Amino acid sequence: MNTNNSELLTFKQAAEFASLHINKNVTTANIAYLVNYGRISKLGENGNTLIDKNELVAYYKSYNGAKELAWKEKLGADLNWALSFDHLKEADTTKHVHRLHPYKGKYIPQLVEYFLDGHKDEFKTEVFVQKGDIILDPFSGSGTTLVQANELGLHAIGVDISAFNALIANVKIGKVDFTLLHQESQNITNALKNFIADANYLHFEADFSQYLNDYDKKHFPSPEFKIKVRKKEVDEQTYADAHVQIVTQEFERLRKQYKTELKPTSQHNFLHKWFLQPVKTEIEFVHSQIEKIADQNTKNILSIVLSRTMRSCRATTHADLATLINPICEPYYCAKHGKICKPLFSIFSWWERYSKDTIQRLGEFSGLKTNTFQLALNGNAEDIDILANLQSKNPEFAELVARQKIKAIFCSPPYVGLIDYHEQHAYAYDLFGFERNDKLEIGAMFKKQSRQAQQDYAQGIANVLNNCKRFLAEDYHVFLVANDKFNLYPLIAEKAAMKIVNQYRRPVLNRTEKDKNAYSEVIFHLQKL
């Protein structure tokens, strides 16, 4: 870079200049973050790092710089942008097994790495755990902490009230016979292909898909149609409704021609309500094939593949996959894609795609695995006897925990009345027959966010910490990732006889599919009182 016409600044000078330039407090640690993650260049020689003032100004005018300033304006200057991980791509935050199955409310693996690895920086001035230490996640969800603990050479135990969550986590960190997995996966793919080979509904779908593709190209050309909508040259809803009516007539004509029934037969449970008849039939067929597999690990992996497939094949619009509204059995206007879309008639392509993707992701993780113990237990973290449960499932791991004790807790407790952790996987509970423990969820959605619900939540989280303390080392660390909008965590720490020694406030980017508003959470660091 040509710096002949630019003033070079030390970190301290850069922080002072930036604070005046944007009228916000900027620390040397903030400047270090910008350098470390390539937001601005590192200049200077002989260990004397300097900053180009013009480049610093340009950063705060850029998209990322403007976003940081806007979020701090809304959420407070204490927001630690270094923990936004905004330099990462989606492929980094969903690496290898972290994308085996969708799960609401999970944090990105880099957050776990940041606090549990061996590095220090301007924000994290202490190394909290060493390789070989034992980590506990009493709200382990889909197993992010367990996976990252393995990568870091740490042993880890997870506890979750949801049997399905425990299954997801154990599949991610479990042993894999890749030869057998590939063979059984291919056997089921071939069996499903033969099962649906002469199905009327596939011929119906092929004909209708061709018709719909031609119709959309003519009446909803991309990107021309979206541009017209944006310029208000066309009334989107009126135009779309008229064309949906025309397309539906052809849809019904072809459906009758091919003698195909699509609508669910009843609304008895999730499986009956949210899957078209052909889709439900295929799901039940694949499930029957999985049930024949003798090897339990392989059986579990392919059950997760089927569950992931089911989630993508529910009878809903593309825009409502995350929050189901009404079952969709006919063509509909899709505002997300700016054209008329249709529901899915078959799971075959999704099953085949996810089977291959799962094997690939498990393979990627297998190359990173360390020789450590990880296990997710299905139970109530408020009273579970971790040692007794481990003893029955992995005596060697239980002996290690009894001798060494657990060094740290890292977890994201549930929110207060915000997510229904069982209902989000209702289709899997229906198909696999897992017992549901909705009423034992801390912060259960049905309790909402009343004052009483908040008090119950605080007591529940404190109960978990008090129960877990008997398995912890004397010099333990507890990290709780939470959006404490009701200011409950000081009370929780008090009830658990712990003290909050630090708080790391981080912005949460791309939190949900539809909510892009500025949002933050705090990582509470607790220790023995």
Image (cartoon, rainbow, N blue to C red):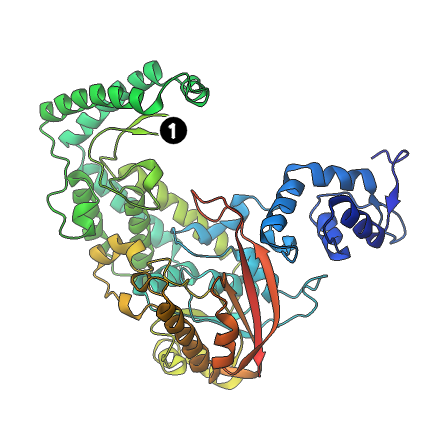
Residue 160 visible (yes or no): no
Q: Position of residue 199 (x, y in %)?
A: 15, 32
- The answer to whether 63 appears left or right of 34 in the picture is left
- Quadrant, the C terminus: bottom right
Q: Residue at x 88, y 40 (%)?
A: 7
Circle 1: is it few (<14), some (14-19), or many (20+) Cα within 10 Å? some
Quarter of the figure with residue 221: top left
Nearer-the-camera pick, 469 or 6: 6
Q: Is residue 113 left or right of residue 485?
A: right
Q: Which residue is mark 1?
A: 337
Q: Which quadrant is home to the N terminus?
A: top right
Instruction: Classify 434 as above or below 266.
Output: below
Q: Above or below — where is 404 with respect to 232?
A: below
Q: Position of residue 26 (x, y in %)?
A: 74, 53
Q: What's the residue at 30%, 36% (across, down)?
A: 317
Q: Nearer the viewer, residue 464 or 157?
A: 464
- Quarter of the view holding residue 214: top left
Count the marks: 1
197 to 417, vertically: above or below: above
Residue located farthest toward the top when viewing the structure as drawn: 218
Return the residue nearer the eye: 101 or 374.
Answer: 101
Q: Amino acid at mark 1?
A: His
Secondary structure under badge 1? loop
